[in-house]
Amino acid sequence: EAQGSGECWMVTACMLADYPLDRMRKEIADKFGETWVYMMNRRKASHTSDRNKMARFVAYRLGVPAMMSLNWAYGFTIRRGPAPRLRIPHGRGAIMLVKLVKYRTTNSRTRRRRYVEYVVAHVVAFEDGMIYDPNGARVYDEDGYAGHYHGWRLEKVVQVRRRSGALTL
């Protein structure tokens, strides 16, 4: 099943734990009174601790590593220049990818144009040389992965123990 906006980490965690995504969404809504999508897309800094609690709940509930604190966005230092070719690690786990995005904006009051940069992150699962992308429920081999995520950088890899079944989307 494809992810909602901002759900890549949770969907990947559910894939790695062989846990039904709909059940996890319901458990989150029951425990926190909000959906994962709603909380992860709130931009106020005051919601960061709530997002972290939600992520820790998912990691604990599924028995998967808490891949990242959701404060991660302020800690990236992305090098300039061409990104290296992405390779799929051996084994099974999750990969966090990051990319620096630049867009042009115009101040409505002064009509001045400026460029704003921000970091975009995405989490995908990997197993046996294949990438399982929860954004659109796609599967890539190494060439497809390197082509689709051209320009992205590998930020973090987390290995998990192999379970009995193969990953499914």
Image (cartoon, rainbow, N blue to C red):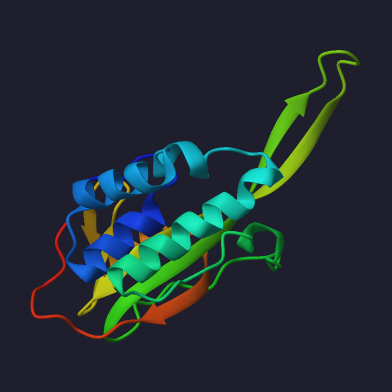
4, 53: nearer the viewer: 53
Residue at the (41%, 38%) spot, across then down: 33
* Relative to 35, residue 20 above or below: below
Residue at 32% across / 76% down in the picture? Answer: 93
Residue in the image at 57% along x and 67% along y: 83
- Tell me where residue 49 sits by quadrant: bottom right
**Residue 4, image x and y in percent?**
35, 40
Q: Nearer the viewer, residue 90 or 81?
A: 90
Tell me the quadrant of the picture where the C terminus can be found: bottom left
Residue 119: x and y, percent? 63, 53
Exactly how many numbered labels are in the figure?
A: 0
**Residue 124: quadrant of the picture:** bottom left
- Image vertical order of residue 144 relative to residue 120, above or below: below
| Residue 10: percent from left, percent from top | 36, 56
Farthest residue, direction top: 109
- Inspect this view and state whether residue 151 appears: no
Viewer-proximal residue among 153 and 158: 158
Q: Position of residue 56 (x, y in %)?
A: 46, 65
Q: Residue at x 75, y 40 (%)?
A: 116
Q: With 147 as the anchor, is 107 left or right in this view?
A: right
Residue 23, above or below 150:
above
Q: Is residue 106 visible?
A: yes
- Name the residue at the left extreme: 165
131 vs 128: above or below: above
Is residue 33 found left or right of 78 in the rendered image? left
**In the figure, residue 164 lies in which quadrant?**
bottom left
